[in-house]
Image (cartoon, helix red, strand yellow):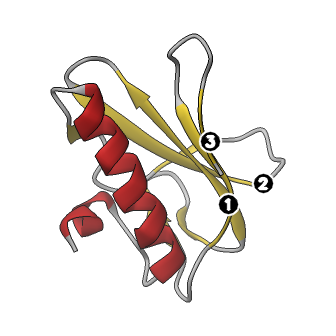
Amino acid sequence: MTTPHPTGGPLLTEGIPAGPGGVMTTEVGVITGDLTLRTDWDGRQALLTVQYDGADEWYTVEGSPVPAPTAAEAEGAHLAMTAAVRRGGAATAADLGR
């Protein structure tokens, strides 16, 4: 489920089952399983991070942040990354155009 924070904060998608090969992160390499994707937008770029559902630690998706000069582009990056997580294959932010 994608939920914008009521104060205009991050977009969150919870309970994404990562496809085979999971998601590549800069901190710990590949993570797999049921994940939460978070996208923060600063008006210029979107920072994509993931965590294991219910965990405290967030990990940066490899290749993030990505250019996103508008809120619509940040949301598009979030939705594209959600699909990439589901596909797996050590998904990175470079996979957003696929």
List x then y, in percent, for residue 68.
20, 34
In the drawing, does residue 98 fall left or right of residue 22?
left
Tell me the mark number nearer the camera, choosing from 3 and 1: 1
Residue appearing at x 35%, y 65% in the figure: 92
For the residues bearing labels 1 and 2, Cβ distance under 8 angstroms? yes
Q: Is the residue marked by circle 1 packed among few (<14), some (14-19), or many (20+) residues within 10 Å?
A: many
Quadrant containing the C terminus is bottom left
Q: Amino acid at mark 1?
A: Leu
Q: Amino acid at mark 2?
A: Asp
Residue appearing at x 15%, y 27% in the figure: 69
Q: In the rendered image, which quarter is residue 56 located in?
A: top right
List x then y, in percent, for residue 16.
65, 65
Q: Earlier in the sequence, mark 2 or mark 3?
A: 2
**Alpha carbon of mark 1 to alpha carbon of mark 2: how far?**
5 Å
Tell me the mark number nearer the camera, choosing from 2 and 3: 2
List x then y, in percent, for residue 97.
19, 66
Using the image, determine if residue 55 lies above or below residue 79: above
Element at label 3: loop
Q: Amino acid at mark 3?
A: Trp
Q: In the rendered image, which quarter is residue 32 located in?
A: bottom right
Using the image, determine if residue 98 lies above or below residue 60: below
> Residue beneath label 2, please?
53
**Alpha carbon of mark 2 to alpha carbon of mark 3: how far?**
10 Å
List x then y, in percent, for residue 23.
49, 69
Q: Earlier in the sequence, mark 3 or mark 1?
A: 1
Q: Furthest residue to the bottom?
A: 20
> Residue beneath label 1, please?
35
Q: Earlier in the sequence, mark 1 or mark 2?
A: 1
> Residue beneath label 3, please?
58
Element at label 2: loop
